[in-house]
Amino acid sequence: MSHSRDNRQVRIPGPNDRDVGEHCKKFGIGPSEERKLQRLLGKHAPLHKIQANAPPRLPKFR
C-alpha cells in the first residue's frame, strides 16, 4: 500500500516591518526627510509605506 504524504512547502514569513532610519541611509535620504518619515510612520514600517511616503530617488549619474 502506498501512503500519501502531505508534502506541501510551508513558508514562515519574517517580519514585514523595516527600519525607517536604515532605509533612509541606504537611499541617501537626508536627516530632515528621515525625521518627517519617522514622525509619520514610526521607527518601523512596511516597505511599501516607506516607499510611498519617501521623496523621489536621486538620479545616479555615470
Image: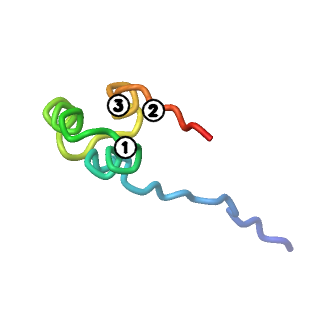
Tell me if 3 is positioned left or right of 61 in this view.
right
Name the quadrant containing residue 60. top right
Q: Position of residue 16 (x, y in %)?
A: 38, 47
Q: Earlier in the sequence, mark 1 or mark 2?
A: 1
Judged by depth in the image, the label closer to the viewer, 3 or 2, is 2
Answer yes or no: do the residues labelled 1 and 2 have beta carbons within 8 Å?
yes
Q: Give the residue type that dot 3 points to.
A: Lys
Residue projecting furthest to the right: 1
Q: Which mark is residue 28?
A: 1
Answer yes or no: do the residues labelled 3 and 2 have beta carbons within 8 Å?
no
Q: Residue at x 78, y 70 (%)?
A: 3
Tell me if 50 is positioned left or right of 5 in this view.
left
Q: Give the residue type that dot 2 points to.
A: Leu
Answer yes or no: do the residues labelled 1 and 3 have beta carbons within 8 Å?
no
Judging from the image, the colouring scheme is rainbow
Check the image and report above or below for 26 versus 59.
below
Q: Which mark is residue 49?
A: 3
Name the quadrant containing residue 5. bottom right
Report how many numbered discs are placed on residues in the image: 3
